[in-house]
Image (cartoon, rainbow, N blue to C red):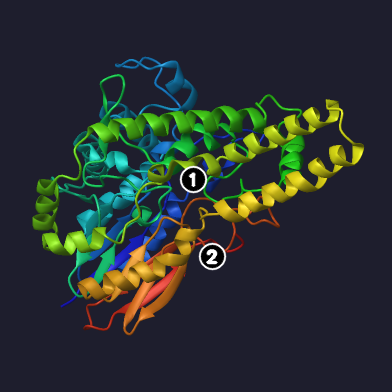
Amino acid sequence: MGGRYLIVSDLHLCDVEDHADGWKAYKSSRYVWDAAFAELLARIEARGEGPLTLVLNGDIIDFDLVSDVPESPAWPVRQTERLRGLDPSEPKSVWKLERVLSHHADFLRTLAGFVERGNDIVYVMGNHDREFHFPAVQRVLSDAIRAAGAADGRVLPESVVRFEPWFFHVEGEVYCEHGQQYDHYNSFRHLLEPTIPNLHGDRVIALPMGNLSNRYLLGRMGFFNPHASDFILNLYAYIVHWLKHYAFSRHRGIFLNWFFGSLAVIWKLLEIKAQLLREPSDDPALLAAHAAHSGLTVPQLESLAELQHRPITDRFFLVIREFWIDRVIIATLMTLGTIALAVTPIPLWTKLTVPLMGFPLVYAIYEWIVHGGTIFDVEHHMPAVARAIARKLGVRVVSFGHVHKPRLVAVDRGVLYADTGTWAPIMDRTRPDCLATGYRNYLSVDFSGGPDPIVDFGSWIPPGG
C-alpha cells in the first residue's frame, strides 16, 4: 500500500507586526493564515484512510523576517544586530523561533492534533529556515508542538517532527526538496554543514545573498513586499514610490536604504566567503552519513548534487551587478567625463557628441557584453531539474517550492512536477488591500490505491481574497 502526502512550502510564518501606515504590511495580523491551514489539513486528512504525511517543504518559518531583539538578552547583541536582526547562531535562532511561535498558537495546536491522530510531519529545510540545522532550534519546535498538545489533553510521542536538511524521498513515489540549491542567489556552498565561525567566535549559518538582502535591504524598506518581487521597478516607479511612502514619512528614503544596505550585504558576503575558504571542502563523511540516513547511495547523492548551482559569490562580479553598483560607477564616470569635457577647450560639437552619443553607445556595448542571469531564471529551469531527478530516482512526483510560482507540469511520461507556490501574502496589483488569487497552494498525492497517484493541486485562498 502506497503513502498519502500533503505537501506545502513557503508558509513564511513570522512574528506579527501591525503598523497604521502600512509599514511591513506583509507581517500584519490580517494575513495570518493559521485557521485556513487547519481547515486544509482536516479536509485532506478526511479524504482517505491510513496515515497522512505532511511535508513542510522549506521556508515554513521565516527567520529573516524577525528583526526585533530581546529586551534583556542572555548574550551580547551588537548595534548592527539591533538594526538588522540577530545573527543566525544557535541561541539567537532559538529566541527568534520562540518569538514566532508565540504568535501562532493555533498553528501549533493544529500540528499537535494532526500527530495525535497517527499522522507524520516531515520538515525539509529551505533557505529562510536553515536555522533548523541547529539541534536546539529543532527541539524548540518539537517541544512547542508537544506542549500545545498537552494543553489540550493530548499525549504526543517524543519525536513529532522529522527534520530533513536536503530532501524527502519515498522510493517510486515522491521527491520533495525546497529548491534553493538550483538558485545561485540562494544556494548554500555546504548544504549538510552550512555553518561557519563568524568574526566574534560564534558558529552561524553562512547565509546566501538572497537571505542577506532580505535582512539588510528589504527589511529596511518595509513598503516593499519581499515575497512578491514588487521591489523591482523602473526609475520613474521608484520616484513615485518614494513620493508616496517616504517623502513625508518618518522612514528613511529608498536611496539611503539601498546604498547602505547594498554595501552591508556585499561586505557580509565577502566576510562569509573568506570564512568558507578557511573551512574544509564538503566532508565525505557527511555525505556518507546522509546516504545511510536517506536510503540512497553516495553516488546517487553525488549525482543529485551535480544538478545544484554554486553560490553567486563564486562570480562576485554578478553580486556587484545585482546591486547596480557597476551602473552607479559607470554613471559617475560618465558624469565626471561630461564635466571634464565641458571645461576643456575643445570644439562644442565634441562636448555634445561624446556625452549624448558616445557614452550611451559605450554603455549599450557594456550591457550587451556583461548581461547575465536574473533572479527569475531559476523558475524557468526547475522543470528540467525535476525531470532529471525523477529519472535518477524513479519517482512519480517531484515537488519544489522557493520561487513562489505555483504550477503543476508533466515533465516526463508519468512524472509530475509541482511548484507549491507560497502562503505568504501576495497582494492583488489592482486591489492592493486584497490577496491575489491562486496562492496558499497545496499538493495532495495519494498512492494508496496503487502505483498511479491521485493528485490534487490547488489554492486555499478564501472566497473574495
Q: Is residue 345 above or below residue 449?
A: above
x 32%, y 57%: residue: 308
Q: Where the C terminus falls, by quadrant?
A: bottom right
How crowded pointer 1 is (Cα within 10 Å; few <14, some 14-19, many 20+) is rated as: some
Taking 6 as reference, is 17 above or below it?
A: above
Q: Please state which of residues 37 and 366 is positioned toward the viewer in this rendering.
A: 366
From the viewer's perspective, is the residue at label 2 or at label 1 nearer?
1
Q: Position of residue 284 (x, y in %)?
A: 12, 48
Query: Residue tagged by mark 2?
Result: 438
Q: Is residue 417 above or below residue 260?
A: below
Left or right of 254? Residue 110 is left
Where disc 1 sits, the SS reads: helix
Number of numbered labels in the structure image? 2
- Residue 144 point in image, percent of width and height: 26, 39
The quarter of the rendered structure image containing the N terminus is bottom left
The numbered dot on residue 318 is: 1
Residue type (three-letter) at the residue carrying disc 2: Gly
